[in-house]
Image (cartoon, rainbow, N blue to C red):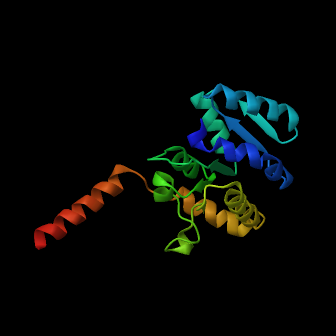
Amino acid sequence: VSRKGVDLLEQALPEIGALGCQVILQGFGDRNYENIFAELAERYREFFVFHKNLDQEETIRILSGSDMFLKPSRFEPCGLNQIYAMRFGTIPIAHRTGGLDDTISDETDMNPNARTGFKFDNYSVKSMLEAINRAVDVFKSRNEWAKLVSQAMRQDFSWKNSARQYCDLYEQIQKQ
């Protein structure tokens, strides 16, 4: 559906392929986009595959076997796939919005040494391609990429961490 940013992917696909990337798109939704991506899969079969399903086991295989996960959503109140991707060591590239912005740290955020992915500010093909290019550049450095993957996999999005933060806040309030 359009809110997931497939319009950006549609426009950028030839340039992504020119970078040497292989792309898998999985899902279903708006028939118009399903038809467009089926046609693009035929046109760009050397680097693009479209799976029109949402089988959970296949999703896990795709996420765990990929190097990067593109999530260019227009808006995303929460989003879990980028969290799953990081757990598998798959680095997210996402539009800086909602839960994507909350869960992914980029070099431009407060702590550049804690980067876990790549984000782009403007909802545009140009901005998305700049983020993809930054990711591809880092990917070329095995040491830097390995560090990034390790940082992403160490992220703790469990309730244990949230509960600890709530307890700390509660204790601070009690002391006042």
Who's the residue at 73% across and 39% down the image?
A: 24
Quarter of the figure with residue 133: bottom right
Which quarter shows the N terminus? top right
Left or right side of 16 for 26: left
| Residue 37, image x, y percentages | 75, 33
Who's the residue at 49% across and 45% down the image?
A: 79
Left or right side of 135 for 111: left
Who's the residue at 51% across and 74% down the image?
A: 111
Q: Is residue 54 visible?
A: yes
Left or right side of 10 for 120: left
- Labels in figure, total: 0
Quarter of the figure with residue 118: bottom right
Quarter of the figure with residue 33: top right
Which quarter shows the C terminus? bottom left
Q: Nearer the viewer, residue 120 or 142?
A: 120
| Residue 108, image x, y percentages | 57, 72
| Residue 123, image x, y percentages | 61, 55
Relative to 35, say whether 4 is above or below: below
Relative to 13, say whether 30 is above or below: above
| Residue 72, image x, y percentages | 61, 49
Who's the residue at 56% across and 74% down the image?
A: 112
Q: Is residue 155 visible?
A: no
Relative to 74, say whether 128 is above or below: below
